[in-house]
Image: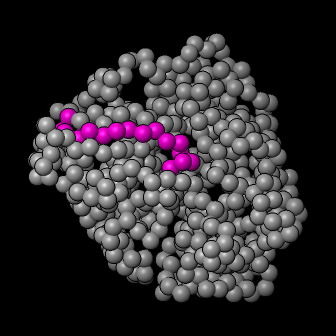
Amino acid sequence: MTADLSRRHLLQLMGLGTGAAALASIAPGLAWAQAKDTVTIAWPTDVPSWDPNQRTFPDGQALFKLIFEQPIMQDPQLKFVPGLFTEWTTADDGMSLTFKLREGVKFHDGSPLTSRDIRFTWLDRVKESLAGGNKLDQANTWKNITDIELAGDYAGTFRLSAPLTTAVPWLAFMANFVVPEAYIKSAGIEQFRAKPIGTGPYKLAEYQVNSRMVFERNEDYWGDKPAIKTVVVNIIKDPSARAAAMQSGQADLTVNIPVRETERLGKVPGLAAELNPIQRVVLLQLRNDLATADQNLRLALHHAIDKAALSKAFYGGGAVPLSVPAPPGTAGDVPGFVFPYDPEKAKSLLAASGFGPGKPATLKMATTNGHFPSDFDIARALVAMWKKVGIEVELETIEYAKYFELNRGGQLPELTLYSWENATGDPEIFTGYLLNPKMPFSPWRGEQPGDQIAKLFVETNTEKRLAGYRDLNKFAVEMGATIPLLQSVQTLVRKEGLGYRKFGNGWVLAQTMTWS
């Protein structure tokens, strides 16, 4: 019945008028933001730093990939393909990876890329971080690395003290970019972060924190040179302001504005709008303490959520409701398993813990506003759904960058609305990191399902490992350790004459853009 809940009904439920999202009037017609050898992008977030190994920061990937490159890359269908490694082989026991490095590649300062830069990036920097030096998220993945044996300037072997069955996916994923040993050692880490260099298709020419960055094409790039010479990225955190920048012609492309604004802008002459399902999961992260130490409350929160209504109201039905933290068709999906929307079940669970009409459960939730499409609207709709079953939730809006600080400091509230990226699709990088108490990526710190995850991290039999993650996903949801909501959807608006290569994980890479 409530699956037919309309967007208008949800907005009324949240106390929003139909004009709440309206933009101020803007002069009709579109002015081209730049010349045809330039593209201007309105982007929602800045990078946390220009050290690409420092943070697993999803929205920074498209920016990092302009300057830096990875040993292994992914094609638009997310297949792993050669990057700076031309070949690689992993041992059956997961204890080593042998590689051949691409020859003739140069960093932006003209120095050659060699296997010593690989050793520096994945061994020296990791060891420094683990010893208490410059802290890098990259070290969380590679903490069991013992050596990188070099076989000349263009080959070598990673050695590990414990299996890392996801070594290949991680070499193509966040916080795993090659950095220049000689430049960092001579200039120092602070100079590197101020004036970063890599082997990528663009050089950073200008940078103003939380405001603007300009990239110029690397004319000595080893691969196919981009068609666009200059890329201007304006950091515009407010989604309505990004929409306004598109309508006024101040930007050529933007992402992650509300669906209703995407649909509206798609009707503006000269603009094209897209709604693309991507390999991210919109979910609620939970703490295993405070109010959510109560399993009945955690499960009541989940049963009270009408996910189909959320999809219909905020994504036009295009966001697939999820019962486990894995998109449909990926290895961690559990076909046939459905966690039901059941408000009466939610009420009975609350009653079992002593909550009722005169004594509502109370807790807090954090959400971003503009990090992914309709995030704030979804949060308010959730609060309204919970109120109907007897749960009072105080909503707090936080900056996307603030989320990482709060999470690492153990300061997030009981609930956090978040979009979890996993460009690789491997279930270890979904649930294995999402609920691992030994990793800094989740507020959940419980022994369960952490003990199960620890066993799967060292399982080298692929069939057993993937089956184990499917069992784990179902178990984690049934115990209320995580509340998956929807497969994430990327909204994108661009000038009609601007083409780009579409990736299944939502990467929007300027090096693939062309003007017609």
Residue 74 percent coordinates (x, y): 59, 60
Q: Residue 45 appears in which quarter of the rendering? A: top right
Total marks placed: 0
Relative to 263, say whether 159 is above or below.
below
Q: Is residue 259 visible?
A: yes
Q: Position of residue 211 (x, y in %)?
A: 70, 37
Q: In front here: 416 or 225? A: 416
Residue 112 lies, in percent from the top left, at 85, 70
Residue at screen point 54% across, 27% down: 240
Q: Is residue 126 above or below residue 366?
A: below
Report if residue 401 lies within the magenta region. Answer: yes
Residue 462, position as x, y percentages in the image: 40, 77
Residue 208 picture quarter: top right
**Residue 245 as seen in the image, left or right of residue 437:** right
**Magenta-drawn stretch contains 146:** no
Q: Which residues are magenta?
A: 388-403
Q: Quadrant of the C terminus?
A: top right
Q: How is the image coloured?
A: one colour
In the image, residue 168 above or below residue 291:
below
At x 66%, y 72%, the residue is: 133
Question: 348 or 213, which is in the foreground?
Answer: 348
Q: Is residue 456 visible?
A: no
Q: Relative to residue 100, is residue 278 drawn left or right?
A: left
> Which quarter of the rendering shows the N terminus?
top left
Residue 337 lies, with reference to residue 252, above or below; the image says below
Q: Residue at x 74, y 87 (%)?
A: 151
- Quadrant for residue 71, please give it: bottom right
Q: For the view shown, which residue lies furthest in the right direction?
A: 110
Q: Residue at x 61, y 14 (%)?
A: 26
